[in-house]
Image: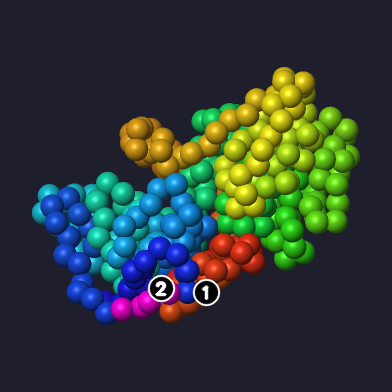
């Protein structure tokens, strides 16, 4: 079995594709023949040793996989060899086969190919959790999404659009802004050439957005907070641009609310509620309400290059590795 192996945390270019034994599913486990594995910014940070949850090398990166059930362990019911599935596996997806608990496996909707199936759950789960659980985004509200051209930002644009909101996307390249518009953003802002606060206020009729979904962090986070409407909600999702230092008077002055969004920790504490959340997301995809973008497909040997692109914010849209 070919897999990408991280032997040491640090430079992502040291990832190696190696041959190893095919894993055997134990009791309650399922083996998936991987057809696509999602590459995420969080997984890249883990390999680089810069993520809050550290993994001990050697290990196989990759937290999302889609493929065909290849074998099941004792006691598994509800899926069988030949089923098309996807799963959040934590790690191990950058391989030809991955073993995961059966409870993590979800049937892949007919309308999704393996590439989309391997690249939408983490991004859409985060956005759904943020906009349905941590706050509630309603029809007609303005939502400002930073980092909108990456996979997490594009999912937020799509979820907000499906909720009936009007979306302003902040993205640093023309390609990323185009992707955000294709996903449903009504307007876009270039943070490198435009005043994000002033432009966001202008685009939303002067009051500012009702919700900020901040994927980017860094300098754009404060500008987005300053743009936020009276009583608005600021959703803290990530900080690839750096962890911002926010003056708290900006929260006080307009009765704003800052809300942390960490779907991963909630999953561990609320497994039943999370299964319901995943079911809601999948059902919305099946109804055509959500429209995951088609990711770029790359071979396993490109894992290091893909992670470098993600860490240096050169990647637009989603990327999957195909064994």
**In this view of the protein, which residue sits in the foreground, 36 or 300?**
300
Q: Residue at (69%, 34%) from the top-left corner?
A: 246
Task: Give coordinates of residue 260: x percent, y percent.
Answer: 55, 33
* Image vertical order of residue 301 relative to residue 194, above or below: below
Q: Quadrant of the C terminus?
A: bottom left
Count residues near mark 2 (Cα–Cα under 10 Å), then give few for <14, some for 14-19, many for 20+: many
Crowding at dot 1, Cα within 10 Å, few <14 / some 14-19 / many 20+, comes out as: some
Kindly identify the residue that appears in the image at 57 percent across and 42 percent down: 237
Q: Main secondary structure of the magenta part?
A: strand
Which mark, residue 174?
none
Judging from the image, what secondary structure is the residue with disc 2 in? loop
Total tally of numbered discs in the picture: 2
Nearer to me, 104 or 242: 242
Query: How far apart, in angstroms, are the residues tagged by discs 1 and 2?
Result: 9 Å
Could you tell which of marks 1 and 2 lies nearer the N-terminus? 2
Which image quarter is the N terminus in? bottom left
Q: Nearer the viewer, residue 115 or 212?
A: 212
Residue 103 at least partly seen: yes
Magenta residues, start to end? 14-18
The residue wearing badge 1 is 305
Q: Identify the secondary structure beneath mark 1.
A: helix
In the displayed structure, 306 sits above or below 193; it is below
Looking at the image, can residue 67 be seen?
Answer: no
The image shows residue 315 at horizontal and vertical percentages of: 61, 66
Q: Nearer the viewer, residue 56 or 257?
A: 56
Residue 274 left/right relative to 97: right
- Residue shown at 51%/30% (left/top)? 133
Is residue 165 inside the magenta stretch? no
- Residue 115 image position (x, y, % from top left): 47, 66
Q: Which residue is mark 2?
A: 15
Left or right, residue 288 beside residue 78: right
Residue 36: x and y, percent? 42, 68
């Amino acid at each position: 079995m070919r897999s990408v192996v991280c032997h040491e945390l640090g430079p992502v270019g040291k990832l190696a594709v190696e041959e190893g034994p095919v894993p055997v599913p134990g009791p309650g486990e399922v083996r998936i023949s991987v057809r696509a594995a999602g590459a995420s910014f969080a997984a890249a940070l883990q390999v680089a040793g810069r993520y809050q949850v550290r993994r001990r090398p050697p290990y196989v990166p990759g937290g999302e996989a889609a493929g065909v059930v290849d074998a099941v362990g004792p006691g598994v019911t509800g899926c069988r060899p030949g089923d098309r599935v996807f799963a959040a596996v934590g790690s191990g997806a950058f391989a030809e086969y991955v073993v995961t608990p059966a409870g993590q496996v979800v049937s892949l909707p007919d309308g999704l190919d393996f590439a989309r199936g391997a690249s939408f759950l983490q991004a859409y789960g985060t956005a759904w959790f943020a906009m349905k659980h941590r706050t509630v985004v309603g029809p007609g509200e303005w939502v400002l999404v930073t980092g909108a051209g990456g996979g997490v930002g594009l999912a937020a644009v799509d979820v907000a659009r499906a909720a009936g909101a009007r979306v302003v996307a902040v993205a640093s390249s023309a390609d990323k802004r185009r992707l955000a518009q294709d996903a449903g953003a009504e307007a876009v802002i270039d943070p490198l050439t435009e005043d994000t606060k002033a432009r966001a206020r202008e685009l939303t009729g002067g009051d500012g957005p009702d919700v900020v979904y901040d994927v980017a962090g860094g300098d754009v986070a404060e500008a987005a907070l300053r743009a936020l409407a009276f009583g608005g909600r600021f959703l803290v999702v990530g900080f690839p641009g750096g962890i911002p230092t926010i003056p708290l008077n900006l929260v006080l002055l307009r009765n704003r609310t800052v809300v942390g969004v960490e779907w991963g920790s909630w999953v561990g504490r609320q497994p039943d509620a999370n299964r319901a959340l995943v079911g809601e997301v999948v059902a919305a995809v099946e109804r055509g309400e959500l429209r995951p973008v088609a990711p770029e497909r790359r071979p396993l040997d490109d894992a290091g290059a893909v992670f470098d692109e993600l860490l240096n914010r050169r990647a637009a849209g989603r990327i999957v590795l195909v064994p």
